[in-house]
Amino acid sequence: MRKRKGSSKTLASSASSTSSSSSSSSSTPHEHGFFACYLLASLNPRFKGHTYIGFTVNPRRRIRQHNGEIGCGAWRTKKKRPWEMVLCIYGFPTNVAALQFEWAWQHPVESLAVRKAAASFKSLSGVANKIKLAYTMLTLPSWQKYGLPFILEFGIEILLLGKWNGL
């Protein structure tokens, strides 16, 4: 095995010691993490009504990235800055569940879970229709089991609409 610079331990022994110490703890950092899907609306008058749907573990940092305040933002949102986070849905048990919700929200016609519900919409574009679609998706069996809160943000004021388990 190869040795690390300035260390007498080999890479294999240090990797096994870190993996054993992390496996002995009762939970991993991502096991009980914060996973959210969000809806952005462009505040740029040239792009009125344009939206972006995404996934994050840190909504405050993510909106700052989209608006170019800090690095590593999505390239797709660069031209239509500034953005406002209109909606945040969180409480997913895993990042996979949140990413599945995000994909279905972005592709409602293609998603097997959402296809029938999306067929009833006249249009799937615009902020209002994306919010209605998210509300509809939360009532579907695929996501109703999670009892996720539905958060609408209006500037500084945040309105919690509640959980959807047996409303």
Image (cartoon, grey):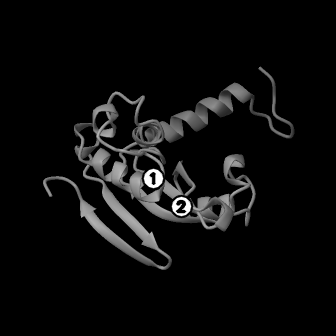
Q: Is residue 86 above or below residue 105?
A: below
Relative depth, front residue between 147 and 117? 117
Residues marked 1 and 2 touching at CB (< 8 Å): yes
Residue type marked 2? Pro
Horizontal placement of 165 versus 16: left or right?
left
Residue 163 lies in what quarter of the image? bottom left
Q: Which residue is mark 1?
A: 36
Q: Is residue 153 above or below residue 55?
A: below
Residue 160 showing in the rendered view: yes
Seen as rendered, the residue at the extreme bottom is: 156
Horizontal placement of 115 versus 70: left or right?
left
Seen as rendered, the residue at the extreme front is: 122
Q: Residue at x 73, y 62 (%)?
A: 68
Relative depth, front residue between 46 and 40? 46
Under circle 1, the secondary element is strand
Relative depth, front residue between 38 and 145? 38
Q: Which residue is mark 2?
A: 59
Measure the C-alpha gap from mark 1 to mark 2.
Answer: 8 Å
Q: Give the quarter of the figure containing the C terminus.
A: bottom left
- Please tell me which of labels 1 and 2 falls first in the chain: 1
Horizontal placement of 111 versus 84: left or right?
left
Horizontal placement of 40 versus 12: left or right?
left
Relative depth, front residue between 133 and 8? 133
Q: Residue at x 46, y 51 (%)?
A: 37
Residue 57 in the image: x percent, y percent? Answer: 52, 53
* Crowding at mark 2 (Cα within 10 Å: few <14, some 14-19, many 20+): some
Residue 128 in the image: x percent, y percent? Answer: 41, 59
Residue type marked 1? Ala
* Crowding at mark 1 (Cα within 10 Å: few <14, some 14-19, many 20+): many
